[in-house]
Image (cartoon, rainbow, N blue to C red):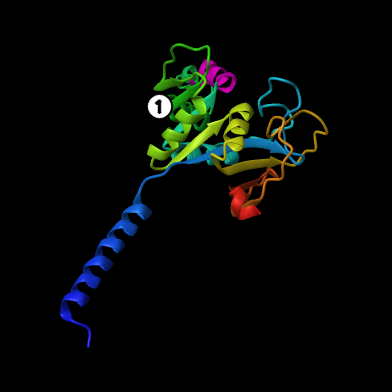
Amino acid sequence: MVPRFLLDRHLLLTIVVAKCNHYWEEEPMGRFVYGMNVSLDLRIEQVPGDNGAGEWVRIDEELHREWNAQEQALALMVLGRVVYEIMEEYWPRAREDVSLPDYMREYAEIWTAKPKVLVSRTRQSADHNTRIIGGDDAIEQLAALRAETDGTIGVGGAALATQLLRASLLDELLLATHPTILGFGRPLFDDYDMPIELDLLEHRSFESGVTMHHYAIRDVSEAS
């Protein structure tokens, strides 16, 4: 027969371990999600600078409202300088542009109000609820941001997404695939030639022929 004090000690240890495990499971951890419009051959630009807004992209009201919902659900956005400056130039002013459809003005409100992080070595200031991360330790700062964030962190910009991927910090992809093969142009990631193993989380089709796929990026240890 096991003495009572040993049973009590075992029970206490079990409770402590259970509470610790619960804490570790509940501890907030953000997820970096790279969202982008892509062609069937995973190009994001046909002409330099079109940034997923070329004539090959079929963004109608249905798809635009889906992007609105996806960005509304973000905890915050992390953007490279080029993408940020394109968005900064257009969307804050679009909020009051009555010539635009309501779903575009809605996106303008979402983008302008959403907390944002601009990753840049050259910018010293930014408006529209934006703070700046820069310097040689930018990736380390982004890792810390991910660790302290509870929720999804949208990633904007191929160069930034590639850096996060190389650092094993990129968690998910959200790709709106347009039914076009470009044949040339900028790829989804810059100068990255390693296999990337993915798990499909969800997918959706749109009347325009666009399909949206949401993938989790497997860890290198899981993929090997």
Question: As displayed, is residue 166 above or below residue 90?
Answer: below
Residue 8 is left or right of residue 147, and the answer is: left
Residue 126 appears in which quarter of the rendering?
A: top left
Q: Which residues are magenta?
A: 81-91
Q: Which x, y percent locates residue 30?
A: 44, 41
Residues 122 and 107: in front is 122
Q: Say whether residue 136 is magenta.
A: no
Q: Which x, y percent locates residue 16?
A: 25, 61
Callout 1, which amino acid? Ala
Residues 171 and 214: in front is 171
Residue at point 47% right, 35% down? 143
Q: Secondary structure at mark 1?
A: helix
Residue 176 appears in which quarter of the rendering?
A: top right
Residue at point 65% right, 36% down? 37
User: Is most of the magenta stretch helix, strand or loop?
Assistant: helix
Residue position marked by numbered label 1 in the rendering: 113
Q: Which x, y percent locates residue 33?
A: 54, 40
Point out the image quarter for the C terminus: bottom right
Residues 53 and 32: in front is 32
Question: As displayed, is residue 168 above or below residue 203?
Answer: above
Residue 11 appears in which quarter of the rendering?
A: bottom left
Circle 1 crowding by C-alpha within 10 Å: few under 14, some 14–19, many from 20: some
Find the residue positioned furthest to the left: 5
Q: Is residue 146 visible?
A: yes
Residue at point 59% right, 42% down? 174
Q: Which x, y percent locates residue 26?
A: 35, 52
Residue 195 is left or right of residue 143, and the answer is: right
Point out the image quarter for the N terminus: bottom left
